[in-house]
Image (spheres, grey):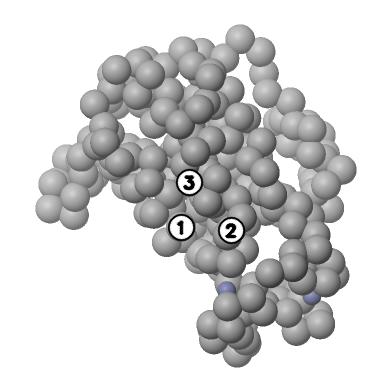
C-alpha cells in the first residue's frame, strides 16, 4: 500500500482533487479491489473504500483513546484529532465526537460497557463517507446518538433510551446542518460542545467545561473552509 498523500483531502493514490458526484458509478477499491458504487471518485478513476481510507488511522485510534490526558470532552477531541495519518475529511472522523464525550464521561465515573471505545468506532464506521451530503445524516452528528445510546444502554426495543439516542442524533445533525461545505472537524467540535449540555440535562452527567475556546489550525488544509463563518476560525 503506497499512500502518497494520506493527510490531504485529495486522492490518496495520486493526489488529484476528488470529485463528488450526484449519482454513484461502478468502481473497485484501488487498495483492496473490493467492487462498489462510488460517489466520491478521483478524476483519474481511483476509488478508495471507507475501510482502506481509514486503514492507517483507525488502527491507532483505540490506542490513542486509551491514552488521552484531558478531562474536558472538547480537549479530548483535540487530542483525538492529532491521530497520525488522519486525512482532512473522511469517515474515520465519525467516531470522534462519541469517543470524546464517552471518554470524558468515563473519567467522571459514568458506567459504560467495557469495550465502549471499540463499540463506538464499530458503530460510527457504519456511516459511510459523504453521508452528510448524500443522506442528510452527518457521521459526526450521528456520533452524538451513538454516545447517548452507549451511555443509556439503548437498544431498538428500549423505548425511552432509544428515543433519547434519536433525539441526541437529531441535535448532532442540527449542529452539522449549518449551510457550509462539509468539514468533519467543524461538525465534531460543534457536536461535542452541544453534546456536553445534552448529557448534563438529559442524563445528569456533568462534564468539565472548557477553559478556552477551541481554535482551528487546519484552515489552510481545508479547501472549502468557510473562514469567518466557522465558529472555530
Ligand atoms: Zn487518483
Ligand atoms: Zn478498499
Between the residue at mark 3 and the residue at mark 1, the CA separation in whole angstroms equals 7 Å
Residue receiving disc 2? 54
Q: Residue at x 57, y 39 (%)?
A: 188
Q: Which sits earlier in the primary sequence, circle 2 or circle 1?
A: 2
Q: Look at mark 1 in the image and give the residue it sits on.
A: 125
Label 3 to label 2: alpha-carbon separation: 12 Å
Q: Decide: is 83 above or below 101.
A: below
Q: Is residue 175 visible?
A: no
Taking the image as shown, residue 40 lies to the left or right of residue 35, namely right
Q: Are marks 3 and 1 in contact (CB under 8 Å)?
A: yes
The residue wearing badge 3 is: 95
Residue 104's quadrant in the figure?
Answer: top left
Residue 125 horizontal/vertical position (percent): 46, 57
Residue 13 in the figure: left or right of residue 96 = right
Do callouts 2 and 1 mark residues in contact (Cβ within 8 Å)? Answer: yes
Task: Please name the residue shown 57% across and 14% down the image.
Answer: 210
View extreme (bottom): residue? 26
Amino acid at each position: 500500500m503506497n499512500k502518497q498523500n494520506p493527510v490531504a483531502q485529495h486522492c490518496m493514490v495520486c493526489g488529484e482533487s476528488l470529485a463528488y458526484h450526484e449519482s454513484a458509478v461502478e468502481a473497485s477499491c484501488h487498495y483492496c479491489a473490493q467492487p462498489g458504487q462510488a460517489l466520491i471518485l478521483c478524476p483519474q478513476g481511483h476509488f478508495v473504500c471507507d475501510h482502506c481510507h481509514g486503514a492507517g488511522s483507525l488502527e491507532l485510534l483505540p490506542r490513542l483513546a486509551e491514552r488521552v490526558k484531558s478531562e474536558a470532552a472538547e480537549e479530548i477531541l483535540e487530542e483525538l484529532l492529532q491521530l497520525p495519518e488522519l486525512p482532512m475529511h473522511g469517515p474515520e472522523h465519525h467516531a470522534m465526537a462519541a469517543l470524546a464525550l464517552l471518554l470524558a464521561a468515563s473519567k467522571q465515573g459514568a458506567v459504560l460497557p467495557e469495550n465502549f471505545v471499540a463499540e463506538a468506532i464499530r458503530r460510527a464506521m457504519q456511516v459511510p463517507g459523504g453521508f452528510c451530503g448524500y443522506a442528510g445524516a452527518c457521521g459526526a452528528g450521528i456520533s452524538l446518538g451513538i454516545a447517548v445510546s452507549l451511555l443509556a444502554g439503548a437498544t431498538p426495543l428500549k423505548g425511552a433510551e432509544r428515543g433519547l439516542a434519536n433525539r441526541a442524533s437529531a441535535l448532532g445533525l442540527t449542529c452539522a446542518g449549518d449551510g457550509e461545505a462539509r468539514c468533519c472537524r467543524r461538525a465534531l467540535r460543534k457536536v461535542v460542545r452541544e453534546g456536553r449540555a445534552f448529557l448534563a440535562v438529559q442524563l445528569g452527567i456533568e462534564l468539565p467545561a472548557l477553559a478556552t475556546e477551541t481554535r482551528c489550525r487546519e484552515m489552510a488544509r481545508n479547501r472549502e473552509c468557510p473562514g469567518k463563518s466557522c465558529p472555530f476560525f
